[in-house]
Image (tube, rainbow, N blue to C red):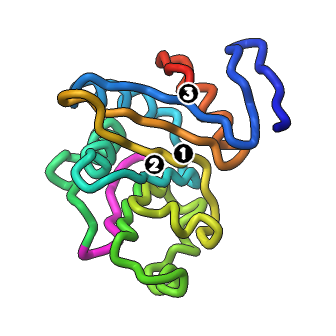
Amino acid sequence: MPSDTSSSKNIVRSIEATLRFVFADEAAVCAFAAHLAPRLAAGDMLLLEGPLGVGKTFFVRALAKALGAASEEVGSPTFALVQELDTQPPILHADLYRLADESELDEIGAWEWPGQALALIEWGARFLGALPASCLLLHLTFGEGDSRIFEFRALSERGHVLLEALGEFGAEAP
């Protein structure tokens, strides 16, 4: 697998570079969201995967709050499919759980997302080849007790840049 080592942060870049974090509780997740938020920009797309109840929407809410949204403004867009949040940069929060196939992406305006806003997409990995752009895939899993495990995978060059910045937060080796 091709790779090169970044001398400044000693993070290995590869086609499938990953970073793994274990957060003890919701407060730790919120602190991480506050670290990540200023590094995100309009045009970035973060795909969130994981079992029901693992905290995908909670993480989106923490990111949105760090970007200026009122926390009560952020809910799960399971039935609306896409929720626009007035933050800086603007957020498009989508939940693709109920979509049956790629043709429905056009119906919800997925082709307009890149460049317009920061796209935070729950259940989007199954449409990875059809989505217009992506930079990071985040897989969330349950840890012991209240802990959560976040594993980020770069899906683009921009994703590699974000992984490098996230490595400053203290990731574990995958």
The label number, if any, that marks residue 174 in the structure image? 3
Dots 3, 1 in contact, CB < 8 A: no
Single out the mark in the foreground, 3 or 2: 3
The label number, if any, that marks residue 41 in the structure image? 1
Whether residue 85 is in magenta: the answer is: yes
Magenta residues?
79-88
Identify the image quadrant of residue 120: bottom left
Dots 3, 2 in contact, CB < 8 A: no
* Left or right: 28 as drawn, with respect to 110: left
Dots 1, 2 in contact, CB < 8 A: yes
What is the three-letter code of the residue carrying label 3? Pro
Residue 89 drawn above or below residue 81: above
Q: The N terminus lies in which quarter of the figure? A: top right
Identify the image quadrant of residue 27: top left
Q: Residue at x 27, y 46 (%)?
A: 54
* Left or right: 47 as drawn, with respect to 75: right
- The crowding category of the residue bearing disc 1, from other C-alpha atoms within 10 Å (few below 14, some 14 to 19, many at least 20), is some
Q: Which residue is mark 2?
A: 89
What is the three-letter code of the residue carrying label 2? Pro
Single out the mark in the foreground, 3 or 1: 3
Q: At numbered mark 1, what does the secondary structure look like: helix, strand or loop?
A: loop
Asked whether 12 or 94 is in front, the reply is 12
Is there any visible trace of residue 90 in the rendered image? no
Q: The C terminus lies in which quarter of the figure? A: top right
- The crowding category of the residue bearing disc 2, from other C-alpha atoms within 10 Å (few below 14, some 14 to 19, many at least 20), is many
